[in-house]
Image: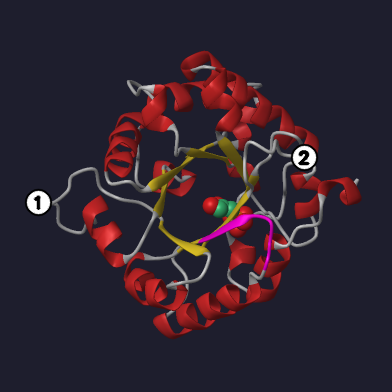
Amino acid sequence: MSSPLRKPLIAGNWKMHLTLAQSLELARAVRDGVGDAASEVALCVPFTALALVAETLRGSRVRLGAQDLHWETQGAFTGEISPVQLVDAGATMTIIAHSERRRYFNETDEAVNKKLRAALAAKLVPILCIGETLEEREAQRTFKVLQTQLEGGLKGFAPVDLAPLVIAYEPVWAIGTGKTATPDQAQQAHLFVRKTCARLYGEGFASGCRILYGGSVKADNVDRLMAEPDIDGALVGGDSLKAASFLRIVHFQAPAAAR
Ligand code: 13P
C-alpha cells in the first residue's frame, strides 16, 4: 500500500478521443460518481475540451489536466499551447513526455526538461511520463532507460521546486495492448524510480513523490496494482473513456483486501 505520505492519484488520459458532447457527458458522470473516493482524481482531456470540462468540474473534487504544453508563455509557435493558456482554460495539471509524444513527435529529454520547468513556473502539477519499450526491456535495459529519462527530464532543478511533481511509469509495451505489467514488474520499476529520485534529489523528495503506473490499467487489475507499496496511483488510457470502468478504477479496493 502506498505510504500515507502520498495521496493516491487516479488520472484519466483521454488522448485524442471524444467530441465536446461526449466529453461533457463523461466529465459529468465522473464528477457525479467520484463520491468519497480515497484518491485524488483528474481528467486529462484534449485542448479543445479544456474550457468546457472546466465548467463541468467547477466546484467538484475532480481536477482538470492537459496532455502536453509548450515551454514558452506566448509567441510565434503555430499550433502550440502555452502553460498560461492551459491555466486560463482551467487546467491545474498537465501530462508531460507521454511515450506517444516521445515516439511520434520526437520529444527529447531536453524538450521535456523545458516543459517541466514551464509547467512548474505556471503552477501546473506536472505528470512526467517515463517508460521502456519492449525491445529495451528484452535487452535488459529497462533501468538504464528509466534512469536516462529521469536524469534528462529532471536536470537542474532544486528539490523544493520539484515538490508538486508526479511521475508516471508507463512501459510502452503495456500501453493500449491489454498487456499490463504484473504488479511485481511494476513495483520493481517504481522502486527503482524512487531510489533514483532519492539519489538525485534526496530521500525527503523521493518519499513524498507520487509515482503512478500506466499501461492497460483496468477495472479488473487495479486492485492488485494498487496493493504494491510504491504504486501511488494510475494513469489510465482506454478505460478512462467509459464512466463505469474509470469510476471502478477510482474506487479501487483497499489494498489489504485485494491480496
Ligand atoms: P491504456 O490504459 O489505454 O493502456 O493507456 C495508458 C496510457 O498511455 C495512459 O497515459
Residue found at the far top of this picture: 199
Query: Left or right: 219 with respect to 93?
Result: right
Reply yes or no: does residue 39 show up in magenta.
Answer: yes
The mark tally for this picture is 2
Considering only order in the chain, which callout, 1 or 2, is on the residue closer to the N terminus?
Answer: 2
Q: Nearer the viewer, mark 2 or mark 1?
A: 2
Classify mark 2: helix, strand or loop: loop
Q: Position of residue 255 (x, y in %)?
A: 82, 47
Q: Amino acid at mark 1?
A: Gly
Q: Quadrant of ligand 1?
A: bottom right
* Residue assigned mark 1: 75
Classify mark 1: helix, strand or loop: loop
**Highlighted range, magenta:** 36-42
Note whether 72 is above or below 57 in the view shown: above
Reply yes or no: does residue 198 show up in magenta.
Answer: no
Query: Left or right: 69 with respect to 186?
Result: left
Q: Marks 1 and 2: in contact by CB < 8 Å?
A: no
